[in-house]
Amino acid sequence: MPATRISRRRALQGFGGGAAAFGASVLFGACGGGDDDSGSSSEGTPAHADTRATAIPSATAKTGGTLRVALSGDPTGLDPSTSRGGNDHNWLYSIFDNLVNNDPTFQVSKGIAEKWEVVDDLTVTFTVPASGITYHDGTAYSAQDIKATIDRHLDPATKSFAAGSLGSVDKVIVSDSTHVTFKLKTITASLFAILGDRAGMILSPTAVQKLGEDFTNKPVGSGPMKLDNWAVGASQKMSKFAQYRKQGYPYLDGIDVQIVPNSSVQFANLRSGNTDLIQLGQKDVDAAKKDSSVQFVQWPSTGYTQVNLNISQKPLNDIRIRQAMTYALNRQAILDGIYFGVGTLANGPITQALWAYNSNLKPIQEDLKKAKELVTAAGYPNGITFDFLITAGEENTPLSEMLKAQWARVGLNVNIVPVTATQATTDYRDQKYPFFLTGFSGRADPDLTIFDNFHSTGAFNRASFNKSYTKEESQVTLDQKIEKARQVYDQAQRKALYDEIQKQIVENAHGIFFTHQSNLVGLSKRVRNFTNYGDGKLRLHEAWLDG
């Protein structure tokens, strides 16, 4: 298919995103609540409530104060190259400045770059400041740092989780102090979304060289907040960076994050006035809607819950076992029993929050007879036993037990292996386990979700780390479709390709999907300027406090 050339005007307005139905910026005040119930649908029809707190008139932002936040766990790290958790963004976006940003509706917006031009299908030039930006360690930024950041991702020695999304970048050229050009090997329609994520967070080269592997614990960026302290398992403290490039910003003096694993304890702290912002657990949604002392916000997420499969390992290299695993599940029971009916049944890895959602693809229905037949056909008439890696937690532990019970009905017997999040990532990457209970937070462009998780070279496709892996036919054709989809600018053409890709992923069980999530946030009455971004990531530094 010949490349569809994009006009300069379109490039300046937005690149390959398409406005989302959700994610508008709203100033919140008064009491929370909404009329829509969080239902569920066995047919995968929209059931996400889009519940906004009552909007208040725009007011002059107040400066000062510390935002008190409770989150369920530490970041996996704060180096944009090597951190791997979706929730890491809740810290990263405050500490680092991106070359460009993804706005609340998935459109490209200014970051360090003031403007950009798609010169041709394989050339994009960014106009950046020559000076005026300082890193948290006091060193001065230059345009060369952008090249250094991208080169670091692409260096195999870094083992960057962003390397796969940047694989189409041939080289970065700094032509002068204000112009940086990306030369691409192939058309990459998702380039701006990629640079609005981890890959485009610009690092201090001095700090990277000085700190080495410890950079992930002591990150140095040029963002509006700097990390002052990190007590693992307890708290992180960030403070306003006085030399930030935008005068008078951020409004907050600081952000204190407390690690509180239990969501109900977080909610109790919010209601008592000891916390300003939490990500609500599903079981607390009804109470939050009715509580006039808090602000409640809910909107569709790009995230989904899943079992991540390493299809290069036995027995999952047999498509029949993978398919049996997915037919053996009762997704409605999972949604109701584990997630309190909040969200929708997953029909694949792309949710209703994105334009690429395939509304014609239905969630796989439980079929125990078919699952048993597949297990027998795979050569295990008496069943099979294998290990199931999880990180223990408030949701994962009961969910893993439910999955174990459902699979056992068809002869798929699993030993649950609970480990820490850090250990799980290492063990799974090192091919010690065939599958892992996890979620994925989704991204601003479908390519970032699809490529990294399901392409044979994707950063989160653990089969890619198996040197002896021989791709099955389904993986070969899936790779071809994924590569084609990222090389088309026209959104309608991309949509048709992603419809095919999602169908193939589900039917050939390249992953097992349970639910599409909702973003659930609770706020104290004093929080203003909370913005519900389409990707669900928190930009904590944007808020200000009234009282």
Image (spheres, grey):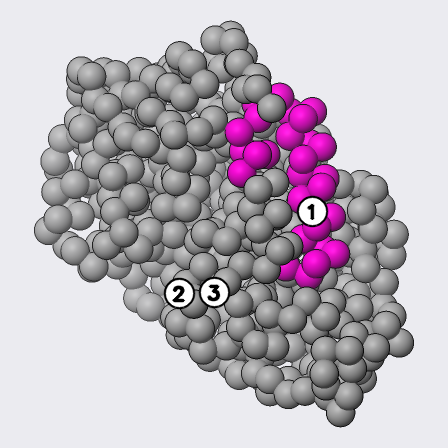
Percent position (x, y) of residue 307?
62, 66
Going by the numbered disc 3, the residue's amino acid type is Tyr
In the displayed structure image, the side of residue 172 where residue 480 appears, left or right: right
Ranked by sequence position, the earlier of labels 1 and 2 is: 2
Which is nearer the eye, 43 or 4? Answer: 4
**Residue at point 50% right, 58% down?**
461
- The mark found on residue 91 in the picture is none
Going by the numbered disc 1, the residue's amino acid type is Gln
Disc 1 versus disc 2: distance between alpha carbons? 26 Å
Residue segment shown in magenta: 483-510
Q: Contact (CB < 8 A) between labels 2 and 3?
A: yes
Where 486 falls versus 351 (above or below)? above
Which is nearer the eye, 497 or 106? Answer: 497
Percent position (x, y) of residue 84?
41, 56
The residue wearing badge 3 is 469
Disc 1 versus disc 3: distance between alpha carbons? 23 Å
Secondary structure beneath dot 2 equals: loop
**Residue 488 on the magenta span:** yes
The residue wearing badge 2 is 467
- The mark found on residue 502 in the picture is 1
In the displayed structure image, the side of residue 289 where residue 63 appears, left or right: left
Where 2 falls versus 294 (above or below)? above
In the displayed structure image, the side of residue 263 where residue 372 appears, left or right: right
Q: Contact (CB < 8 A) between labels 1 and 3?
A: no
Going by the numbered disc 2, the residue's amino acid type is Lys
**Residue at point 25% right, 16% down?**
179
Q: Name the image quarter holding residue 2.
A: top right
Q: Residues within 10 Å of mark 2 (few under 14, many from 20)?
A: few
**Residue at point 47% right, 26% down?**
187
Count of marks placed on residues: 3
